[in-house]
Image (cartoon, rainbow, N blue to C red):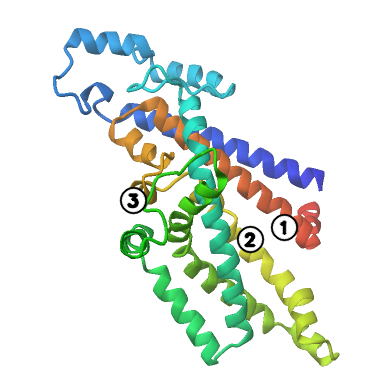
């Protein structure tokens, strides 16, 4: 198991290194630069030269990359061009908790509700229960989260006044914060339940049609025992691959949800960094997101070996 784990970890580190290299080089070869973005008065040649010298952009790209890589190994991604008083690490540290809380709760809602709905649909295949669950999954999955957010905000906040319309609430009062989080979490997480429910239904339905399930039923095992000990255990492997990456994807923020509900999260910086050619911010956010994705898949691979020992056996044979 240790060799299996180390091999997966090594593959993730190589992937992160290659991603950082290509992202860095692509950001440098694209014509133009941050001195051309959003400026009402264009910089003079002297100002551009001073800007490049200040941030080390006058060095060859390979030298810039090696310097960036050395600092990034210490989690120092430099300073943003537009807010030089803040480092990229400080910006991520200050804004991530808001996005992570909303995204983490939304992902948990999507997985919990979606898996439950998918299991119910698979257990009642070709019945009215299955038809209702499948129809819901298809419909809710086609609704963008920001559209659902606008609708919920209008009816539940503006018209009925059941929930706050936005903002973060009083940070010193967790009840007030929780009350403010209900609408953005539901609006962000509910559309994702559609894909989770459909994939769960497919995985569970395939497992239920397997020979070992028919054998277990022939032995007289109860449906509950068959579902928990045989069906769900074997359906977990493909489900984990699809569901765990929801967390880093949603926890790094949503520009639309944060904009609709006025949340001070990290989502808006994804767009801000790319449109303003803020190289340190682009690289910092990209690598932070990639690290979260990499750790998620690393955890997924480890869970593979825990859930299904055949994965470890095959790895040793290879």
To which quarter of the image does residue 147 belong? bottom left
| Closer to viewer: mark 2 or mark 3 | 3
Residue at horizontal 32 percent and vertical 64 percent from the top:
151
- Mark 2 and mark 1: span between their CA atoms? 9 Å
- Mark 2 and mark 3: span between their CA atoms? 31 Å
100 or 27, which is in the foreground? 100
Count the marks.
3
Q: Which mark is residue 186?
A: none
- Single out the residue that lies furthest toward the left: 41
SS at mark 2 in the image: helix
Residue at horizontal 86 percent and vertical 90 percent from the top:
219
SS at mark 1 in the image: helix
Tell whether 246 sits left or right of 59. Answer: right
- Expressed as whole percent of the image width and height from the top left, the position of residue 275 reads 28, 35
Cβ atoms under marks 2 and 1 closer than 8 Å: yes
- Does label 2 or label 1 sit earlier along the sequence? 2
Residue at horizontal 58 percent and vertical 75 percent from the top:
118
SS at mark 3 in the image: helix
- Does label 3 or label 1 sit earlier along the sequence? 3
Tell whether 76 sits left or right of 164. Answer: right
**What residue is disc 3 on?**
260
Q: Which mark is residue 304?
A: 1
- Expressed as whole percent of the image width and height from the top left, the position of residue 263 reads 40, 43
Q: Is residue 19 visible?
A: no
- Mark 3 and mark 1: span between their CA atoms? 38 Å
- Expressed as whole percent of the image width and height from the top left, the position of residue 196 reads 53, 67
| Closer to viewer: mark 3 or mark 1 | 3
The crowding category of the residue bearing disc 1, from other C-alpha atoms within 10 Å (few below 14, some 14 to 19, many at least 20), is: some
**What residue is disc 2 on?**
240
Residue at horizontal 81 percent and vertical 58 percent from the top:
313
Q: Can residue 173 be seen in this view?
A: yes
């Amino acid at each position: 198991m240790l060799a299996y784990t180390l091999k997966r970890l090594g593959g993730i580190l190589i992937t992160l290194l290659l991603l950082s290299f290509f992202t860095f080089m692509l950001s440098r070869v694209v014509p133009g630069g941050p001195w051309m973005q959003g400026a009402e008065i264009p910089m003079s040649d002297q100002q551009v030269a001073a800007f490049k010298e200040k941030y080390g952009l006058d060095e060859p790209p390979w030298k810039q990359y090696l310097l960036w890589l050395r600092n990034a190994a210490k989690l120092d991604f430099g300073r943003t061009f537009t807010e030089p008083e803040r480092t990229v690490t400080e910006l991520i540290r200050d804004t991530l908790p808001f996005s992570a809380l909303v995204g983490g709760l939304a992902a948990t809602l999507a997985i919990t509700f979606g898996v439950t709905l998918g299991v119910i649909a698979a257990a009642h295949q070709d019945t009215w229960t299955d038809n209702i669950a499948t129809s819901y999954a298809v419909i809710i999955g086609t609704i963008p989260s920001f559209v659902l957010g606008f609708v919920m905000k209008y009816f539940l906040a503006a018209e009925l006044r059941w929930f706050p319309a936005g903002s973060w609430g009083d940070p010193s009062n967790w009840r007030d914060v929780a009350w403010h989080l209900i609408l953005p979490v539901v609006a962000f997480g509910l559309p994702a339940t559609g894909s989770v429910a459909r994939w769960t239904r497919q995985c569970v339905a395939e497992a239920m049609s397997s020979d070992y399930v028919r054998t277990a039923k022939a032995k007289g095992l109860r449906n509950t025992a068959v579902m928990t000990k045989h069906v769900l255990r074997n359906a977990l492997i493909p489900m984990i691959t699809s569901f765990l990456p929801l967390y880093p994807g949603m926890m790094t923020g949503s520009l639309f949800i944060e904009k609709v509900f006025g949340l001070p999260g990290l989502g808006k910086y994804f767009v801000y960094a790319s449109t303003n050619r803020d190289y340190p911010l682009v690289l910092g956010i990209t690598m932070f997101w990639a690290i979260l994705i990499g750790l998620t898949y690393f955890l997924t691979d480890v869970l593979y070996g825990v859930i299904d020992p055949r994965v470890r056996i095959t790895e040793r044979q290879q």
